Image (spheres, rainbow, N blue to C red):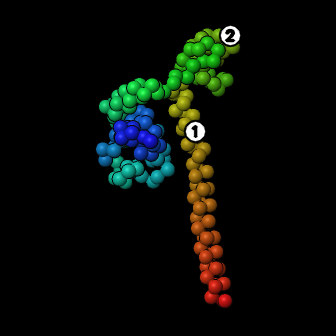
Amino acid sequence: MASSLERDLSCPVCCDIFRDPVILSSCHSFCRDCVQSWWSEKEGKECPVCKRRDSKDSLPANFALKNLCESFLEERGQRPPEALCSLHSERLTLFCRDHQQPVCLVCRDSEKHSEHRFRPIDEAARQHRKELRKSLQPLKEKLKTFERVKVKFDLTAEHLKLQAQDAD
């Protein structure tokens, strides 16, 4: 069972400990990715908790909350594990655009990746997330259409049941 502190340090959207927390004009905080995903699914920018419209163009970081979350995770020994290269046990800091995989600095300088193009891994991750959201949008629209059709079918089925009962 989650402690009271853990609940207070959890994003209301993903229910995990905040990652890169931001604060909205409603004074509610969320993970940056969570609120951006939430807004990409909605027509306007509103707080996922209280539905208050947010007029800010940028999402200000909630540094106090970020520090609290990091301290909490450190205390519990749950620091987010750094991704390490399986070949060199170095931090994965770059993304090889030619192989489409994360690499460490040693890999970058190796023969295998000579003359390849690289990006910082966080930049590549943001780009991949953006592409995934873009690909996900038509699927979400199809899901909404299927849900509307299901509601119509359910209503039709209920209507037919009532007619069958009236016929008896």
- Is residue 44 visible to us here? yes
Q: Residue at x 60, y 56 (%)?
A: 143
Mark 2 lies on residue: 111
The amino acid type of the residue labelled 2 equals: Glu
Q: Position of residue 161 (x, y in %)?
A: 64, 79
Rendered image quadrant of residue 65: top left
Question: Which secondary structure, mark 1?
Answer: helix
Rendered image quadrant of residue 86: top right
The amino acid type of the residue labelled 1 equals: Glu
User: How far is disc 2 from disc 1 in space, using C-alphas?
Assistant: 30 Å
Q: Nearer the viewer, residue 12 or 141?
A: 12
Q: Position of residue 10 (x, y in %)?
A: 41, 40
Q: Nearer the viewer, residue 56 or 143?
A: 143
Q: Residue at x 42, y 40 (%)?
A: 2
Question: Which secondary structure, mark 2?
Answer: helix
Q: Residue at x 62, y 65 (%)?
A: 150
Mark 1 lies on residue: 131
Give the crowd class for mark 1: few <14, some 14-19, many >=20 residues within 10 Å: few
Q: Is residue 125 left or right of residue 8?
A: right
